[in-house]
Amino acid sequence: MQILIINPNSDPEMTAAIQNSAESFAGGQFEVVTKPTPGAPKFIETYTDEVQAAPGMMQLVRVNEDEFDAIIVACHCDPNLDAIKEMTVKPVVGIGEASMKMATMLGHNFSVVTTAMHSIPGKLAQARRYHLQDLMVSVRAPEADASACEDEELFLQLAKAAVEEDLAEVIVLGCAGLTGMDKLIQEKLGVPVLDGVICALVIATGLVRCGLSTSKVLGYNPEY
Amino acid sequence: MQILIINPNSDPEMTAAIQNSAESFAGGQFEVVTKPTPGAPKFIETYTDEVQAAPGMMQLVRVNEDEFDAIIVACHCDPNLDAIKEMTVKPVVGIGEASMKMATMLGHNFSVVTTAMHSIPGKLAQARRYHLQDLMVSVRAPEADASACEDEELFLQLAKAAVEEDLAEVIVLGCAGLTGMDKLIQEKLGVPVLDGVICALVIATGLVRCGLSTSKVLGYNPEY
Amino acid sequence: MQILIINPNSDPEMTAAIQNSAESFAGGQFEVVTKPTPGAPKFIETYTDEVQAAPGMMQLVRVNEDEFDAIIVACHCDPNLDAIKEMTVKPVVGIGEASMKMATMLGHNFSVVTTAMHSIPGKLAQARRYHLQDLMVSVRAPEADASACEDEELFLQLAKAAVEEDLAEVIVLGCAGLTGMDKLIQEKLGVPVLDGVICALVIATGLVRCGLSTSKVLGYNPEY
Amino acid sequence: MQILIINPNSDPEMTAAIQNSAESFAGGQFEVVTKPTPGAPKFIETYTDEVQAAPGMMQLVRVNEDEFDAIIVACHCDPNLDAIKEMTVKPVVGIGEASMKMATMLGHNFSVVTTAMHSIPGKLAQARRYHLQDLMVSVRAPEADASACEDEELFLQLAKAAVEEDLAEVIVLGCAGLTGMDKLIQEKLGVPVLDGVICALVIATGLVRCGLSTSKVLGYNPEY
Amino acid sequence: MQILIINPNSDPEMTAAIQNSAESFAGGQFEVVTKPTPGAPKFIETYTDEVQAAPGMMQLVRVNEDEFDAIIVACHCDPNLDAIKEMTVKPVVGIGEASMKMATMLGHNFSVVTTAMHSIPGKLAQARRYHLQDLMVSVRAPEADASACEDEELFLQLAKAAVEEDLAEVIVLGCAGLTGMDKLIQEKLGVPVLDGVICALVIATGLVRCGLSTSKVLGYNPEY
Amino acid sequence: MQILIINPNSDPEMTAAIQNSAESFAGGQFEVVTKPTPGAPKFIETYTDEVQAAPGMMQLVRVNEDEFDAIIVACHCDPNLDAIKEMTVKPVVGIGEASMKMATMLGHNFSVVTTAMHSIPGKLAQARRYHLQDLMVSVRAPEADASACEDEELFLQLAKAAVEEDLAEVIVLGCAGLTGMDKLIQEKLGVPVLDGVICALVIATGLVRCGLSTSKVLGYNPEY
């Protein structure tokens, strides 16, 4: 089985980090290839970033879909997910959708830890799009924009505040750039911590094995 | 006052129809210019159509924003609306958003009449995005895809069914291509019928006169 | 075009303030007349105040409807709005409804700044009535009842707290008595601030120009 | 214990029917007096009817509250209920509120059978006001307005359709004028049928015995 | 009339406290018998406690239903309520359901005061099950688990915080073990305080007098 | 990896059918053992059935948890799921929860096809418990109770009606007894069809590989 992971931004470092997490999870049981998006911004932070990533993402799908069994969109805001689901017969999974929906099976609620305050309104809108708004008790982000996703201590403190002050039972890492940080926070806090890249691999490989993909019977155009 | 109307598709006929409705409503009190979107599909029907219209729409905004006081996105599914709102300091209004929100001030509920069954799931998702899902009692579309938006009798019958069977009190025309059909249906059925192009002009000119535009304090990136 | 503004209370000072804001916005392009409600309380603060204002409000409509093109109810709690909409063929707009619905087009959420803590439960119920409860992030009011609506500094601080602590992107002035305070707060905070009187004028004049009014096909009795 | 039932309309026949049901339920264990509302319309059907009943209802409360232990508002649309709750220290119960909330304890959902199609939008809004909108599966009313509430067969058929077609488990009689029809429909259909007058007596006498009444700590003005 | 109160736990002290409250409320007008649940845990705190109480609760119903007119489940989390409603023709009332639904008739919202932080997620889920989630403004519990339900001062302070910080208008005692504490807190805070045992008696005796019980027409199996 | 599937009923045939589907899906990559519940009813149809299955289910967990990596509850109504999640440190997945949540990743909505009309209210309540009520467009069941789950044609027709009349995009098989019917219906209708047993295996094996299990930080008692 071969899984294509689209990193919607063009950053080689984040692409490598995602590939690293994915390979480690795959453990040789399936193949996984992460590709950065040509022409996309270096980081997907805004609505315009999302829109600007679209042509490159669609091109990646068009060029690669035949060789892969499933496609993952590896930005936690799930940019252009409906369009990607529509344009291919292969199953498509967003890391935001997969992680937030799996989180609801592990506790009464969840909190998302993310990289910037200005992502909060968009994250709330996204949760609502998935009908998860009443299950997401909070979105926690650093007051000052995090220059480095690598600051594990910072995100650990945010997760701790979510558990202690917002009564969160489960933590979702709200940015692909935080991939790999799940185990550390989980150990320190004693609550499940979900890495979207891993969650999406669970769902995507599962869909492939089940023979399931996006319904094209009505709302998603079957011609693509 | 000058209003730019972006027609997110590239069809010159629909562009002309929108311009015609808009000018007629403006009545010389403000100027209005409708532009088709370069590089966009001929008709916006699918999620991929929406995404494909984005680069051209953003280019239209970038090139024209200085000369205009407000911008209208004239496709009822409000494609790329958040990105357009984000990238300019001028007020931006979608015809879907304006018409559905104005409809709620005229009755207990509303129904949307649109051109194709396969638009229904997307229209429901859009209504939910605006928190209108419990106010929109139905979406009515022809069983066979309407080849011609000009078939007024067809849309009149759909609106009639919405009023009689779904107990709709207000009708929203769910496609820019239906512009101009509002008065006829309103007269025949005796219920308010809203044309999104006109509604968006009401809101856009109002925002200009009020000195109001999109908030850039948190979720919409102020750098654009 | 002539717009009647009903001030549901009997206070001549607030009536003058509303008329002043309205005239200034009209700028000679349409006529506007504000009338206080005979027999109404001096200030509309409670459910019984709302009910006591009803006979006078209905009388104002009955006497004046023929001469005016639209009617505005200028108390932010929109007292007796359904009855006023029902009893006339002219379009009727409440300043609460207009301002809160327009606010949703300018940001991901809004906060209402109002004059008294005891108005909070009623404001929440009103937002819910308009299906806006999940878009209204907070209602901010002075701890001690504001003796004077003129205290701009007080309301500026409340709006500031809404933006900084509640992450509000848009501010709605939640009392007709605050009319005219929008520009100052908007300038100071850099977020859109909506004055209900002005918003209602935008909607009311728009409805007149569109030839739209309350649907009388089912829930609002057409005999009135 | 003495219970005052306010019939918000001025019809002596409906007043007598309500008194009859109430006395029969009281069975001598408490006293109950039903009074018609001076100056109110003959039947409460519209928003303006509701508003017109207000002055008389408030007068009835003011004159009688000292002699009674609780007050019931006996119109299923619960007109002016918040104002009546606010203006007295005695517990106040609406027959719409009591019957719909008690219905939720007897089944997974309920349906309201009422007298006229044009009441449907208002009934939906009322259910939403009580957060019951997802528990009320339907509102059933005669296609032609029922000239006579006495037509038991008509309302039996409506209730039957609610059970069979809408999968209603509980029926609520949606008009005080239907009082006394509950037992017949319950026997014929084998589902619980709730008469609002009786439900309100259960709640009102219960509140008196519990020493409970409307909270005046914030939203309901304690000065009344 | 005879009412059976099932205490879902096996604690004789709590059984006696419930019986005491109930008898005092009954005042000789009806008979009431409280029984502890054989084989149940000493205190119902967890999901497994709830499940473990089920066999004993069902046995109590089977053995006693013929002699009683209605059955009350006297644990505020309403354990196994659907099964108990299903298995008997007699009306069944949970103290959680009764108290939270009656609370909504006395104010704009309510807060639940309960005995342990770890009950909060379950209480939120329970409120949602009854469609009350937006009416319950908070659940307040002691930071450290309360060893003794008798600590009135502790629960008074929690209720006070709910009123002052969460703007609660009504307090619901969220544990049968708090029975009898309502009057004290109500007097001290000046807001309605509801004791679930008493509320359930109001509803249960009312249902008996109305001849109402659980609908068995569809979702609750009529064979039991 | 070893997965325990608990069949909450005691039927050996259904146990074999579940084991068969599970083994076939596992394809030798992990081990799976399905066990019937001692002392449980032959079929889980009612609330009392669910409760009666609890002691045996808990016993199965207690006896087997050490040998297995994850536990699946294989009845689509997810009986006693919270208690089972609470009492073990191993991940626990319900087939109802897994299938309905995975369904939301494959289309705009889903419909559940189940075996009996009287399950409909319970299925709606279950969907609401998972916050899926607005995504589940319908529950379809045979008018007459299906004596045999093997009647594929019957369930195919129900699924077809869901797609054509309810505009369902995805079908969820709402009973473990329908396991194995997914491929046939999927082929015939051209929409994704989900078998809960398979979906639960996807999630359960995924959770094991991720090192994730139920949060015990607050609402689920960590002592079990």
Image: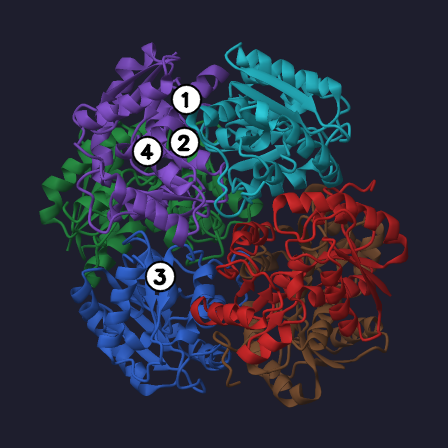
Chain colours: A green, B purple, C cyan, D red, E brown, F blue
**Of the pair D59 and F206, the residue shown nearer to us:** D59
Can marks 1 and 2 be said to lie on one chain?
yes
Q: Could you tell me residue B39's position as x and y percent? A: 16, 26
Dots 1, 2 in contact, CB < 8 A: yes
Can marks 4 and 3 be said to lie on one chain?
no
Q: Is residue B69 among the parts visible in the rendering?
A: yes
Chain label for disc 1: B
Total marks placed: 4
* First along the sequence among labels 4 and 2: 4
Mark 1 — residue?
A: B204
Dots 2, 3 in contact, CB < 8 A: no
Mark 3 — residue?
A: F100
Which mark, by number, is residue B98? 2
Look at 17% across and 24% down and name the residue there.
B12
Tell me the distance, in whole angstroms, between the alpha carbons under discs 3 and 1. Answer: 42 Å
Q: Secondary structure at mark 2?
A: helix
Look at 25% across and 80% down and name the residue there.
F151
* First along the sequence among labels 4 and 1: 4
**Quadrant of residue B79 in the image?**
top left
Q: Relative to C193, is F45 above or below?
A: below
Q: Could you tell me residue B165's position as x and y percent? A: 39, 54
Q: Relative to F215, is C22 above or below?
A: above
Q: Secondary structure at mark 1?
A: helix
Tell me the distance, in whole angstroms, between the alpha carbons under discs 2 and 3. Answer: 34 Å
Chain label for disc 4: B
Of badges 3 and 1, the one in the foreground is 1
Q: Secondary structure at mark 3?
A: helix
**Quadrant of residue C176 in the image?**
top right
Tell me which amino acid carries mark 2.
Ala
Tell me the distance, in whole angstroms, between the alpha carbons under discs 4 and 2. Answer: 10 Å
